[in-house]
Every structure is written in C-alpha cells, then in structure tokens.
Image: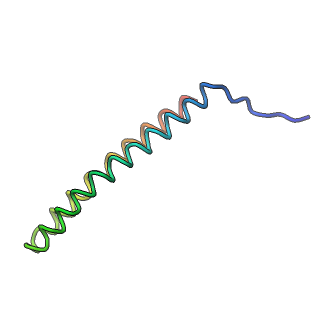
C-alpha cells in the first residue's frame, strides 16, 4: 500500500510565494549593496577613518534578505 502526501494547487502557490519572497529580496539587496559597496570602498580609499561607516552601510541592505526570510517562513507556515 502506497501512501502519498496530497499536494494541492494552493500548497504549490504558497511555495512559489515563499520562493519569490526570499529570491526577490535577495536580488534587491544585492543590487543595493553593489552601489553602496563601490561608494564605501572609494570613500575608504580617500579617508581610512570611514571604514566603520562604510562597513555599516554595506551591511544595511542585508536586513532586506532577513525580512524576506521571515516572510517566507510565515508563508510556509500557512501550508
């Protein structure tokens, strides 16, 4: 006797939504971090004391990915 888990269309759509939540937030953070990182390296090349500020500004877009992960976990909790 073979017992298979029933996957409905709603479960599939929830999985797609969770994937989009984490994927699009990661893409957005990567695009933002690209510009911020380039500016931070340029500023640090001119003034070494801007290292801490540049590091903090480079890490700020990563919070978007954390928010996307939280939303994805919440969406998967509905499944």
Residue in the image at 26% along x and 51% along y: 32
| Above or below, 58 relative to 78 | below
Q: Is residue 34 left or right of residue 70?
A: left
Residue in the image at 48% along x and 39% along y: 73
Residue in the image at 56% along x and 35% along y: 15
Quadrant hosting residue 9: top right
| Above or below, 47 relative to 37 | below
Task: Locate residue 26, reporting x and y percent.
Answer: 39, 48
Task: Locate residue 29, reporting x and y percent.
Answer: 32, 50
Quadrant hosting residue 36: bottom left
Quarter of the figure that contains the N terminus: top right
Q: Residue furthest right?
A: 1
Colouring convention used in this rendered image of the protein: rainbow
Quarter of the figure that contains the C terminus: top right
Q: Is residue 19 left or right of residue 45?
A: right
Residue in the image at 27% along x and 58% along y: 34
Task: Locate residue 25, reporting x and y percent.
Answer: 37, 44
Count of numbered tags:
0
Q: Is residue 5 left or right of residue 70?
A: right
Front residue of 70/32: it is 32
Quadrant hosting residue 57: bottom left
């Amino acid at each position: 006797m073979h017992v298979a888990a029933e996957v409905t269309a709603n479960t599939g759509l929830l999985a797609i939504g969770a994937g989009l939540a984490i994927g699009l937030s990661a893409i957005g953070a990567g695009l933002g971090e690209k510009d911020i990182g380039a500016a931070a390296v340029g500023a640090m090349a001119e003034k070494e004391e801007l290292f801490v500020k540049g590091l903090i500004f480079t890490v700020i877009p990563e919070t978007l990915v954390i928010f996307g992960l939280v939303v994805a976990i919440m969406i998967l909790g509905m499944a």
